[in-house]
Amino acid sequence: MSRSAHPAGPRHADVLTEGHYSAPAADLNVLDEKVWSRTVTRDADGALTVGGIAVARLAEEFGTPAYFLDESDFRARCRAWADAFGPDADVFYAGKAFLSRAVVRWLKEEGLNLDVCSGGELTTALDAGLPAERIAFHGNNKTVAEIERAVEAGVGRIVLDSFQEIVRVAHIAQRHGVRQRVQIRVTVGVEAHTHEFIATAHEDQKFGIALADGQAAEAVRRALSLDGLELIGVHSHIGSQIFDMAGFEVSARRVVQLLAEVRDEHGVELPEIDLGGGLGIAYTSEDDPREPHEIAKALSDIVTRECEAAKLRTPRISVEPGRAIVGPTAFTLYEVGTIKPLEGLRTYVSVDGGMSDNIRTALYDAEYSVALVSRTSDAEPMLVRVVGKHCESGDIVVKDAFLPADLAPGDLIAVPATGAYCRSMASNYNHALRPPVVAVRDGEARVIVRRETEEDLLRLDVG
Ligand SMILES: *Cc1c(COP(=O)(O)O)cnc(C)c1O
């Protein structure tokens, strides 16, 4: 989407040298339900509440910065995905977006499966009691120890990502006397981001085995020839924060073409295809994500049509949404520390967190919204940049946004849609203590990942 620089109101009428923002909302006190989790609202005093609890109480009890996760919203999104895809498809939540034992239990109760991509994620899932057959193991360089662990645990599938791994997994499975169910991850030559996708002939990336030059067909040949492996299908994942289904269309067409080639060469119809994750969410009011049932219908129509054309039985479809489930369900709460108006530019608002709890803006220019949540305000909008407390000028949380001009130190502000890839990518830069994740539901708040302490830091530093 293209976003134009827009006059920012009288206070900053002559500012607009650079920037990537829209006009301020007509009323900054109104919380756009697209970017906030479902139980978020303002109470009679104007304070934001989630799960029926006001942010001032949350800040007092749990401190700031902190992530607050709307549990009933998370569960509702799991159910929406499971219902949309129905019994003939599988939904795998991509654990790398955010994983904890509580989350695993919610997934288990709501009938979802789980993608993991490291021994740590696998341990978390198993420890929380998710049956191993509901787990898929991903990654472009799983260690031998990780593969051993996954095979021993009996994970439902391992997604093979290289020729070395095909052999490695087959050997380990044989040694354990099992046939490991596997998929082969193929690179289909499609890169999708937000509103665009690029279809290319070859791929320049570390994931998967290329379709284009016959490598994927060779990988299938080898996997079918090895006793330790039961090849159940083909996997493709084309990007992230995708709104345009056209990339999935090209990807599905290419994957189905491979299934047809496999049938012609081996007389085998592989029973499953996995179309990956990457579905977009609303970070700002300008994003319009699709509902799970629209996505399910679009994907199943594409696959059905392509299979009919290739005279193949329609395979079982799986998808792997991470961001689309957890992203919208949490916000990060910060306290405003300092405020620096730079005349003719913008106002820098410093909060008590930053790139250590949300690296996405610094890492890939992600866009976020922000709101004053401890109170309402009738002051005019001011153009702000919300920055952290780290020793890095790129330590930006929200690049361009509007907050009321009477913003003051001590106010609480919140950044919505931080459920995915924020806590899971959090760091200890500057020896920051990673914030807690607090699940809020029906008037109760409970810590599911506690705040790090200075003792935690010193415990790792063995002197
Ligand atoms: C990252 C990833 C996902 C999840 O992506 P989202 O953008 O969070 O939906 C799914 N599948 C694979 C293989 C991935 O690498």
Image: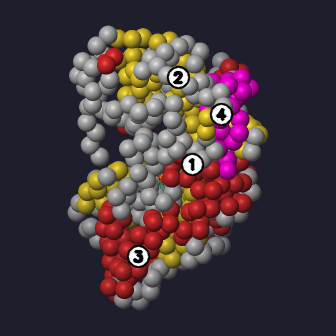
Marks 2 and 1: CB-CB under 8 Å? no
Q: Residues within 10 Å of mark 2 (few under 14, many from 20)?
A: some
Q: CA distance from mark 4 to mark 1?
A: 24 Å
Q: Residue at x 49, y 22 (%)?
A: 378
Marks 3 and 2: CB-CB under 8 Å? no
Q: CA distance from mark 3 to mark 1?
A: 26 Å
Q: Quadrant of residue 414?
A: top right
Q: For mark 1, what is the residue?
A: 326
From the top left corner, tell me how far across and down residue 332 is, in percent. 57, 32
Instruction: Tell me which numbered mark, 3 or 1, is placed earlier along the sequence.
Output: 3
Q: Residue at x 23, y 22 (%)?
A: 17
Given this view, does label 4 or label 1 mark the residue nearer the observer?
4
Given this view, does label 3 or label 2 mark the residue nearer the observer?
2
Q: For mark 3, what is the residue?
A: 301
From the top left corner, tell me how far across and down residue 159 is, in percent. 50, 63
Q: Is mark 2 within 8 Å of ligand 1?
A: no
